[in-house]
Structures are given as structure tokens and as C-alpha cells.
Image (spheres, grey):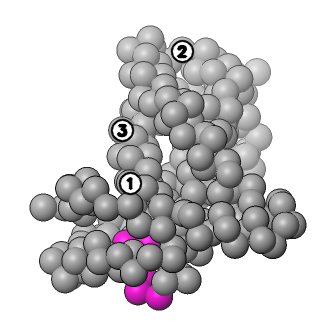
Amino acid sequence: MGYTEIIQSNSSYATMNQDVTLALFDRLAALEQAALTDSFAKRHKVIAETNDIMLATASECRRRNWKIHTAIWNPCLFLNTVAFDLSYLAYELAYEEDQWKRGLTARHLATLLFEIAEDLPQVFGKDFNKALDALAVGSDLRDSFRSQLKSVSKFWANHREELKQIRTVCGAHRDHDAILLLQTIDQIDLFKILQLGISLDATLNKVGPAAQAIIAYTSTVQPPELTK
């Protein structure tokens, strides 16, 4: 049983000020921490290596002033980077033993979830679509990618308000009412935030291969700037 199933099988509501907060995470750690730690380490190594390659390629496109290919690689690099952050925060929330640090990690995770879901459709917006046109990317690749990206928009529509409250009050500290700040921290459902993190992570794991397919195709197309 993976940690997704363990979490979904437990219906307890846990807020920051309840002793039950520790129960699920400790059970998770006792059952599978060694295996999942190894799995996360391998995954994070792959993501980090991928980020290095994508950064080098995007930077080279920008250096050569290949604006159209940059408009493909830069959003995909953004996607891989935020997926890296998301995976790390979900792992830290699952395994952190200190109660305050768990709450802090949950706040950071909620803020990241809000910003990923809000920003990703914009990151893959007008400039990206113009680049797809310029490089004659086929409708099959486009449709596959857009179909997966719609799941991010759906996540945004379903969870925007609950994530916004955490982000605004105690993630980004936009509200300076300290009483409201601590009350909001106290009411955070750690299990729910972890579930949302796992959910969006799974979504990005589907967006990624669709984006990679576009990268693979466009990498075979000569930069239009070279034909001018």
C-alpha cells in the first residue's frame, strides 16, 4: 500500500492542535518510510538531472536568440521545476515529526498548490501556443497536452478558495492580523493538504509526458530564426 492509499483509507480529521495529528504520519513512517524514502530519492535524482538538461537547453536557445524554441523549453522547465518543489514538500509533510514544522510545511505546500494551479495555464499560454503554430506541432500532440492541462484548471476551480485562505493569511502572510493568522494555522487540515499535494502531483505526472512529447518533436525542427 502506497501513502496515497494509506491517507485515503483514514477518514480522521486532524488539525494542528489535535494529538491525532501525529497518528497517520507515524503509521506511514512505520510501514513504508524506508521504501518510500528510497523511491523519492531516486525520483528526485531523475527530476534534478532533467532540470539540469532542460535549463542548459533553454539557456542555449535564449543565448542564440531562438525565441520560438525558447517559448517551448522555458514553460516546460517551469513545469519540471514546480513539480520538483511539489514532490519535496509532499515528502517533507509526510515524514516531518515536529508538529510546528509539519504545519509550516503544509502552509508552504498549500501556497505552492495555489500558485501552480493558478499559473500553469498562463505559463503555457499565448507565447507557447504561437510557438506550437510556428513549429507546426500536430493536433494530436496539442490535444493530448491540452487534455492533461485541463486537469490543472479543474484542480484550481475545485480547491482555489480553501487554498487561497491558507496562502493569503498564513502562507504569504498578506493579512497582518496575528490572531487570525494563528487561528488559520490551527485549523489547517494536514491530511487534506497532503492529499491535495498528492493529487496535483499525480496530475503533473500526466502533464509532463505530454509536454515531453512536444519537446521531442520540436527538437527535430530547425529554428525558424535560422531561415531568415
94 inside magenta stretch: yes
| Viewer can see residue 50 | no
Which image quarter: residue 123?
top right
- Reading the chain from its start, which is encountered first: label 1 or label 3? 1
Question: Would you say 160 lies left or right of 196 here?
Answer: right
Q: Which residue is mark 3?
A: 206
Asked if 192 appears above or below 26 in the picture, the reply is above
Please give the range of residues in magenta.
93-98
- Give the number of the mark in front: 1 or 2: 1
Residue at horizontal 44 percent and vertical 72 percent from the top: 93
Viewer-side residue, 217 vs 86: 86
Asked if 118 appears above or below 100 in the picture, the reply is above
Mark 2: few/some/many CA within 10 Å (<14, 14-19, 20+)? few
Residue 20 pos. (x, y %):
35, 76
7 inside magenta stretch: no
| Viewer can see residue 1 | yes
Disc 2 marks a residue whose amino acid type is Ala
Residue at horizontal 42 percent and vertical 37 percent from the top: 207
Q: CA distance from mark 1 to mark 3?
A: 17 Å
Q: Secondary structure at mark 1?
A: helix
Residue at horizontal 39 percent and vertical 75 percent from the top: 21
Q: CA distance from mark 1 to mark 2?
A: 39 Å
